[in-house]
Structures are given as C-alpha cells and as structure tokens.
Amino acid sequence: MDKRKFVKKLEKNLGMNKIRTQIRAISFMFVFLVIGAVFAIYMNHSGVWLSYGIVIAAISMLILAMFISYRLKLQARLNNMKLDYRERVVTPYAREYFEDGDFLKKGSLTERELISTKMFSDTADYKYTSNNELRGIHKSIKFVNADVYEDNNPLEYHVKGRFIAFNITTPNINPVVLTTSTAPILDFQDDRVHLIKPKNDVIGRMFRVYAFDEKEANELLTDNMVYKLRQIIGLQLGKIVKIGFHNDKIYVFFTTEESTYAENFTKKNSVITELRKIREKFNVVGKIIDIL
C-alpha cells in the first residue's frame, strides 16, 4: 500500500482527526454566530428593525451556547482518549512492513522455549516472561522478535530486553552461546554446557563463550564470524548482549531500558512520528540480518 494511503487509513481508524475536525468546525461556527449576532444588532439599531436584531442575536447566542457545550464534550473526549498503541498502530504497521508480518501483545515465547535456546540460566531462581511478539519474513529470513523479562527473585535481579530468533542455518549441531562480560554468568542444570576459552583472542576479549563441544565452537568462530560479531556489538544495541547458535537458528538478545513499544496512543502522538519510531525499531531486525 502507498505510504500516504496507509497513514490516512491509520489516522481514520484511530478516529482522533475526525474529532479534531469537528472541534475546528464548531470553533468556526462560534466566530460566525458571534459576528452574525453583532451584525444583526448593528444593522437594526433603531426603529422597528431593532427587535428583529435582538431576536436574531438571542437565537444566535442560544445556538452558540449549545455549540460551546458540545465542543467542550468533544475536547474532553479527545483529551481523555487512550487508544491501544500496539493494537492500533504497531500491529497494522507490522503487517504492512514485513512479509507475512504480524504482531501479538500476549501469548509470545514460553519460558521453556526461551530456556531451550541455552541463552538464559535454567535454575529455579530464574523466571522468564515475554510479550510483544513480532514475527515475519524480512530479506527472505524468517524471524521472531519479542520483549523478554528476566527475574531472579532471591537476588532481586531484573532484566528487560529484546530477543530475536532468526532462521539461519549454522554449521554447529550443539549450542554455542556468547555473552558480553556485562552479562551475569549463565547457570545451567545441564553439565554439558560450560565456559570455554576460544582460540580466537578477539572473541575472548569480547565475549564469554559457552558450549558443549570446544572444537565445534572454535570451528564456528571463524575470522568471518568474528567480523560479524564485532559489527553486531558495533550497533550498540544494549549494555548486555547475548548471541546463540543452535538448531539451525541464530538468537540475539540485548537489554533495553523499557518495553519496545508504548502502551497508549493519545492526542499528543502524531501518526507519522510514531511510525518513524516504530520503523527504527523494526529496522534493528534488518540490520542484524544484513550482518549475519
């Protein structure tokens, strides 16, 4: 769909512009009625015509009072409007922007699915929830993106981040996970997952590396892969970055200060401005795909 048509359709569905138009029309009528009333009295300021002027002025003022009341109601309605940002703006834009694109506020990746990637600790102290699931195909690569919340109640440790899974074939069979030094040490019940010292010194300075098989991990971390990983770090996505390779998928997780998308769309929001912000967040997926 043409961008202008999409913006107009979105604005129409939001309904705020319709209320703004009604408020402007009523404001115009205010001026018209006031001028009409004054003009009627002025043109009929003497003789028998004065009574007609007063009648016209009175009717104008009565209509004006009704319009003022209606305008105040419309303004209050506009001021109090809080539409679902993710449902009304993000979802239709995701379907427009990505091939087979879709967006779900709830019902995203389960805790079991997240832990199975070996990107997160699987001990009982850690709990994971996710929402804001974005999925689709971009540049022929299928992906799933969601907000993930990691909580460790005994340590009162809480992390917010974006998790993206790309359907990109990798040479390794067993999982290989890299985390930046700012990330907590991963704690696994599975003894096979352990920290290794990679042969490539650059990787060793950038990440902690977890793997089942050191030989397989080192075969994955070629000079070309190191170059790609350095580019991902160069995107400065978040304070903590995790990258995993497992089951013919590449996973990327990075921390964020807040949820990826706002909750409410109000009169202060501009459709064009908000679409630009959402597009910047969508583009993170494309930037990572370009690198990988």
Image: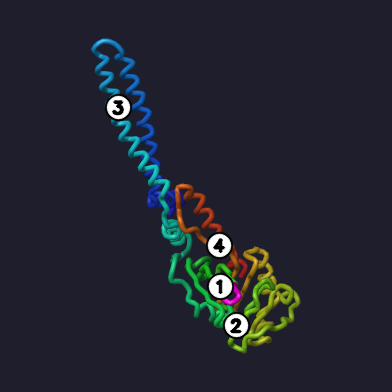
Question: Residue 31 lies in what quarter of the image?
Answer: top left
Decide if residue 285 is on the left or right side of residue 88.
right
Furthest residue in direction top, as rendered? 47
Residue denoted by label 2: 175
Q: Is residue 174 above or below residue 226?
A: below
Tell me where residue 86 sits by quadrant.
Answer: bottom left
Asked whether residue 140 is in view, the answer is no
Give the image location of residue 173, x and y in percent: 58, 85
Q: Which disc is residue 26 wearing?
A: none
> What's the amino acid at mark 4?
Glu
Q: Where does label 3 land, which residue? A: 60
Question: Along the polypeptide, which appears first: circle 4 or circle 2?
Answer: 2
| Closest to the observer, 10 or 291 | 10
Chain-order first, disc 1 or disc 2: 1
- How far is mark 3 from mark 1, CA to CA? 63 Å
* Residue marked by disc 4: 258
The three-letter amino acid code for the residue at tag 1 is Glu
Name the residue type under label 3: Ser
Query: Residues at badges 2 and 3 in contact (C-beta under 8 Å)?
Result: no
Taking 199 as reference, is 10 above or below it?
A: above
The mark that comes first in sequence, 3 or 1, is 3
**Magenta residues (range):** 152-156
Q: CA distance from mark 1 to mark 2?
A: 21 Å
Q: Position of residue 29 (x, y in %)?
A: 35, 31
Q: Closest to the observer: 64 or 14? A: 64
Label 2 packing within 10 angstroms: few (<14), some (14-19), many (20+)? many
**Residue at label 1?**
150
Q: Main secondary structure of the magenta part?
A: loop
Which residue occupies 60% across, 68% down?
Answer: 254
* Relative height, residue 39 to residue 92 (above, below): above
Dots 3 and 4: beta carbons under 8 Å?
no
Q: What is the x, y in percent for residue 112? A: 50, 80
